[in-house]
Image (tube, rainbow, N blue to C red):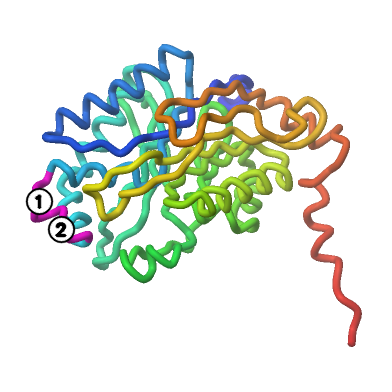
């Protein structure tokens, strides 16, 4: 029996994550530790933090850093190893998976990538990086103001609960990305998001629900929430964490398994039945995922 087939039930926790101001590293460490401990106390096995939740880190780096976005990116690189070590240690201690908040990571060519990393317990009792996804589609703000570079590489991550794909915020609005991950074996798509308007939030939410419907898979959206007036990057956040499902037999009629109250910090929990995904694809009222390739055979008439 392979590893994935041994774990058919999964309790997930999706964060509605508020942006904090820190005086020192220990403040951040304690916040992340408290969030993880709360999710563990509620039985969660997979924790999902949002896009750009890491942009609270510059608060501890001084006023000179806070005055310039690119200076923030550069200064944050000195914290990356500590961020990874903290998440790996927590994943090992509690024997669970953690999708850390995405981080603007400096590449060898001098560009930055918006990277989301999935951490888990390793074989030697220590935590490890199970995999990562760099953002594939850049928003105008990322392109024109932050100069964050996109990647062309779509990743798939092996976990004890099966294969997992990640669509970072705007990525979720483009159907071919998630479809490739699902076609390669993913039954769960994680969507860490950061949106500053209600319209932006709903674009991501609608994309997530469409991806769950057309691929007949679970989609887990996490979000930043609230205001952080001191931050140029994440000063205003409108968000709501949700877990979306296929819209068919055995699932909620509206395709929403769980959702939080908008802009209220905290976890949103749901229990996923991985066997139900296989069942709905084989015995559902409709076969959205199976019928996906039929689109390619349809065309407008000549002339």
Q: Residue at x 60, y 27 (%)?
A: 258
Question: In this orientation, which residue lies closer to the viewer: 286 or 23?
Answer: 23
Dot 2 falls on a residue whose secondary structure is loop
Q: Range of the magenta residues?
A: 61-69
Please name the residue that numbered disc 2 is placed on.
Answer: 67
The answer to whether residue 65 is left or right of residue 253 is left
Q: Quadrant of residue 28?
A: top left
The residue under the point 64% across, 56% down is 175
> Which residue does the image show at 66% across and 47% down from the upper left?
211
Q: Which residue is nearer to you in this view: 87 or 38?
A: 38
* Disc 1 residue crowd, few under 14, some 14–19, many 20+, Cα 10 Å: few
Q: Is residue 25 visible?
A: yes
Q: Is residue 208 magenta?
A: no
Would you call the spot at circle 2 few (<14 residues within 10 Å), some (14-19), or many (20 or more)? few
Q: How many marks?
A: 2
Task: Indicate the quadrant containing the C terminus: top left, top right, bottom left or bottom right.
Answer: bottom right
Q: Circle 1 — which element? A: helix
Residue 1 visible to an observer of this rendering = no
Checking the image for residue 63, the label placed there is 1
Q: Are marks 1 and 2 in contact (CB under 8 Å)?
A: yes
């Amino acid at each position: 029996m392979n590893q994935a087939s041994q774990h058919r039930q999964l309790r997930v926790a999706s964060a509605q994550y508020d942006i904090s101001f820190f005086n020192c590293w220990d403040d951040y460490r304690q916040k992340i530790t408290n969030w993880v401990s709360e999710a563990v106390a509620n039985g969660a096995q997979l924790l999902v933090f949002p896009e750009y939740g890491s942009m609270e880190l510059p608060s501890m780096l001084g006023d000179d850093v806070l005055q310039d976005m690119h200076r923030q990116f550069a200064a944050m690189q000195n914290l990356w190893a500590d961020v990874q070590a903290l998440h790996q240690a927590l994943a090992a201690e509690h024997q669970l998976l953690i999708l850390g908040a995405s981080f603007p990571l400096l590449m060898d060519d001098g560009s930055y990538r918006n990277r989301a990393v999935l951490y888990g317990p390793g074989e030697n009792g220590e935590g490890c990086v199970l995999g990562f996804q760099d953002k594939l589609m850049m928003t105008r703000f990322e392109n024109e103001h932050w100069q964050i570079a996109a990647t062309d590489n779509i990743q798939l991550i092996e976990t004890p609960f099966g294969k997992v794909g990640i669509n970072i915020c705007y990525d979720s609005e483009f159907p071919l990305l998630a479809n490739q991950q699902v076609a390669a074996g993913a039954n769960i798509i994680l969507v860490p998001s950061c949106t500053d308007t209600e319209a932006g939030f709903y674009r991501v939410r609608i994309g997530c629900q469409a991806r769950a419907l057309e691929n007949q898979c679970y989609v887990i959206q996490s979000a930043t929430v609230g205001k952080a007036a001191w931050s140029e990057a994440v000063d205003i956040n409108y968000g709501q964490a949700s877990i979306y499902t296929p819209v068919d037999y055995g699932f909620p009629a509206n395709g929403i398994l769980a959702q939080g109250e908008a802009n209220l910090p905290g976890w949103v929990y749901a229990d996923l039945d991985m066997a139900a995904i296989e069942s709905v694809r084989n015995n559902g009222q409709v076969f959205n995922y199976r019928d996906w390739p039929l689109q390619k055979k349809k065309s407008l008439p000549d002339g």
